[in-house]
Image (cartoon, grey):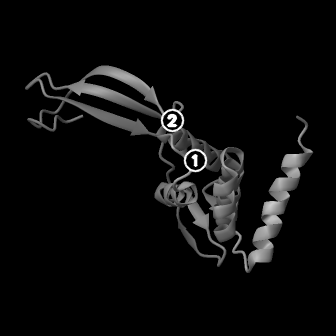
């Protein structure tokens, strides 16, 4: 890696740390030429994955879309940045494992997000479901809430 200080061609790794449930690595680097120290972050990137949308069109997979929609659903709900990062990493892992060849249905991605949100925050799950499942009225919203409540009461304590 090139030094951002003096543009020397090579730098030395001083320290390595695993981040985000082993989905990213932070490396502390030092330039042998000028002594400048800086950090880099390596993380898994989903390459060449196409998302088939409901209307039949295809678009490139975007981690930013996942981050944005989960952030909106969890707004003012999840206080821990670390839990948020682990959630995004778990969603991305499931997307990678579920994708067949180089395509995945947008509905499959939505289902994966819903599954993870349901586990960690029921209100965020309802927020996301109301947009993702395109609730037409309050009755559909109420039915989804009632499903959550009935499952909660059926669990053995």
Does residue 102 lie above or below 82 as drawn? below
Q: Give the image location of residue 154, x and y in percent.
A: 91, 46
Q: How many marks?
A: 2
**On the image, numbered disc 1 is attached to which residue?**
92
Q: Which type of secondary structure does the marked residue at label 1 adopt?
A: helix
> Can residue 71 be spotted in the picture?
yes
**On the image, numbered disc 2 is attached to which residue?**
23
Residue under the point 56% across and 51% down? 77
For this rendering, which residue is in front, 32 or 38? Answer: 38
For this rendering, which residue is in front, 19 or 47? Answer: 19
Q: Give the image location of residue 112, x and y in percent.
A: 68, 53
Q: Quadrant of residue 125?
A: bottom right
Split into 4 quadrants, where in the image is the N terminus? top left
Whether pointer 2 and pointer 1 mark residues with C-beta atoms closer than 8 Å, the reply is yes
Q: Residues within 10 Å of mark 1 (few under 14, many from 20)?
A: many
Give the farthest residue toward the top. Answer: 14
| CA–CA distance in space, label 2 to label 1 | 10 Å
Badge 2 or badge 1: first in the primary sequence: 2
Residue under the point 61% across and 47% down? 91
Side of 134 relative to 60 (left or right): right
Q: Give the image location of residue 74, x and y in percent.
A: 56, 54
Residue under the point 74% across and 79% down? 137
Residue under the point 56% across and 62% down? 50
For this rendering, which residue is in front, 102 or 157? Answer: 157
Q: Quadrant of residue 86?
A: top right
Q: Which type of secondary structure does the marked residue at label 2 adopt?
A: loop
Side of 60 relative to 102 (left or right): left
């Amino acid at each position: 890696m090139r030094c951002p200080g003096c543009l020397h061609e090579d730098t030395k790794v001083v320290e390595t740390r695993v981040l985000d449930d082993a989905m990213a690595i932070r490396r502390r680097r030092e330039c042998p030429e000028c002594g400048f120290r800086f950090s880099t972050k390596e993380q898994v990137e989903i390459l060449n994955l196409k998302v088939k949308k409901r209307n039949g069109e295809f678009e490139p997979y975007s981690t930013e879309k996942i981050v944005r929609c989960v952030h909106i659903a969890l707004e003012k709900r999840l206080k821990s940045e670390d839990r948020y990062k682990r959630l995004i990493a778990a969603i991305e892992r499931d997307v990678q494992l579920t994708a067949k060849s180089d395509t995945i249905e947008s509905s499959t991605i939505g289902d994966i997000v819903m599954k993870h949100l349901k586990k960690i925050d029921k209100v965020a799950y309802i927020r996301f479901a109301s947009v993702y499942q395109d609730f037409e009225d309050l009755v559909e919203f109420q039915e989804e809430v009632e499903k959550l409540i009935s499952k909660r009461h059926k669990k053995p304590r």
